[in-house]
Structure formats: C-alpha cells, structure tokens
Amino acid sequence: MENDAYKTIDTPSEEVLFKDRNSKFFGYAFPVETEDDIKAALEGLKKKHHTARHFCYAWQLGTATVRFRANDDGEPSNSAGMPIYGQLQSFEVTNILVVSVRYFGGTKLGVGGLIHAYRASAKMALEAAVILEKTINVSFQLTFGYDLMNKVMRIVKERNLKITDQRLEMDCLYVLSVRKKDAATIFEIFTNVYKVTIKEI
C-alpha cells in the first residue's frame, strides 16, 4: 500500500542550546513549503545572531518527490549539514528546515566534535518541535444538479469526506479533499452516480 501520510511541523520550534567547550550551538526547526521560506528563515536568524560564525542547516521539501540540501557554511566538509540532515531522516520529517547557529568558543572541536555538536543541536531542535502527521490528499471537483444534492451529501457523510469549496449556482459544484489512498474508490463511487461529473483538479 502506498504511504499517503507524512510528518512535519506547523510552527517553528523553541530555540534550543547545545554547548561544547565554550562553543554554543543554537538549534531551530522551521516549517517550510518553498525555497523562499527557507531563505526568509535564514535571513531572520542572521539578523538575530549577527555576530555568529556559522549558520549550518539542512532542509527537505516534498512528499512524493523529495528535494533536500545540507550546508556546512564554512565548517569542514560534511561535519555540519549532513549530521543535521541525518536527524531529519531519523525523525522522518519533511517540509522542514533545521538550522544550527554556532558561536565559536575559542577551542577547536575537531571534525568528530563538530559532527556530534551539530547532530545534538538538530536533535534537540526537532525534539522541541511539535511533529504532526498529515495526509497527502487529492482534490476532486464534483458537478451535479440540485436534485442530486441529498444523494451526494449522503456519500460525503458516509465516507467522511471534506468539502473544501462549494459554489451553488445553476448547478452545484463541490471541491472534495480526499486522502490519496482512498482517491480511486471515491472517484469510482461518484463516477457511478448518474448525472454527477467528477474530475481531479
């Protein structure tokens, strides 16, 4: 069965702080839908932490097709972005940006120390966030005459469907949001109702 649910967050996490030998790592998780959202979140953090050395981050967008990026922002290669991305994978979240802002404390941590610190800071940020499960939905547009209103509404109620938009003019037009795994069934039910047209939008 195809997986039609995913985990994400709706609100930014609380700020968390991980310390190692005077270096401070401030961790944040943000809900993001686009690369513009990511840019805006990073710019906000750069204003807030204008004296910090490094803004290392990882993000993942999408459900069916996934895009991601990990950025070390001047730290040794793969010592920051990938450990943060590893936490996105272990929490199985998407449409999310995790940033770890580092203030250098005067003592070098070495690559192993950095990997540990960035991983810990990302993990704390994700633990501080409220992770929700959402479903991947398909939208259908139904068009039918008023005489079929009761029949259509009965199916909507029985199947617990969500009407996201409706226009009642010469004909009735409903937009339904249907969970992806149920979409084929729902499509077939309405296709078999005489004088109701259904199309995916």
Image (cartoon, grey):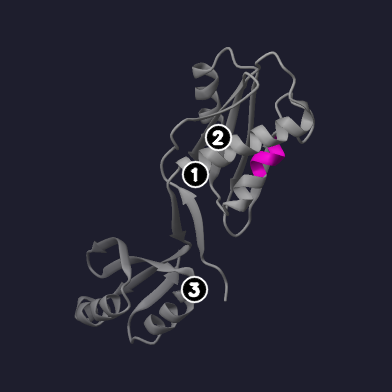
* Mark 2–mark 3 distance (CA, rounded to whole Å): 30 Å
Mark found first going from the N terminus, 2 or 3: 2
Tell me which residue sits at (71%, 30%) in the image.
Answer: 114
Q: Are marks 1 and 2 in contact (CB under 8 Å)?
A: no
- Label 2 Cα neighbours within 10 Å, binned few <14 / some 14-19 / many ≥20: many
Q: Picture coordinates of residue 89 (x, y %)?
A: 63, 51
Would residue 68 be found to the left or right of residue 17 on screen? right
Residue holding disc 3? 181
Q: Picture coordinates of residue 51 (x, y %)?
A: 58, 12
* Mark 1–mark 2 distance (CA, rounded to whole Å): 20 Å
Which label was assigned to residue 38? Answer: 2
Which label was assigned to residue 113? Answer: none
- Please identify the quarter of the rendering in which residue 137 is found: bottom left
Q: Residue furthest front?
A: 21
Would residue 124 be found to the left or right of residue 175 on screen? right
Secondary-structure class at tag 2: helix
Tell me which residue sits at (43%, 34%) in the image.
Answer: 14
* Mark 1–mark 3 distance (CA, rounded to whole Å): 29 Å
Task: Verify whether residue 84 appears in magenta.
Answer: yes
Q: Please provide the residue range marked out in magenta.
A: 81-85
Tell me which residue sits at (49%, 50%) in the image.
Answer: 8
- Please identify the quarter of the rendering in which residue 172 is found: bottom left
Q: Main secondary structure of the magenta part?
A: helix
Tell me which residue sits at (24%, 80%) in the image.
Answer: 154
Mark found first going from the N terminus, 1 or 3: 1
Mark found first going from the N terminus, 1 or 2: 2
Kindly report which numbered mark, 1 or 2, lies closer to the viewer in this rendering: 1
* Kind of residue at disc 3: Lys
Which label was assigned to residue 127? Answer: 1
Q: Are marks 1 and 3 in contact (CB under 8 Å)?
A: no
Secondary-structure class at tag 1: helix
Q: Is residue 103 above or below residue 41?
A: above
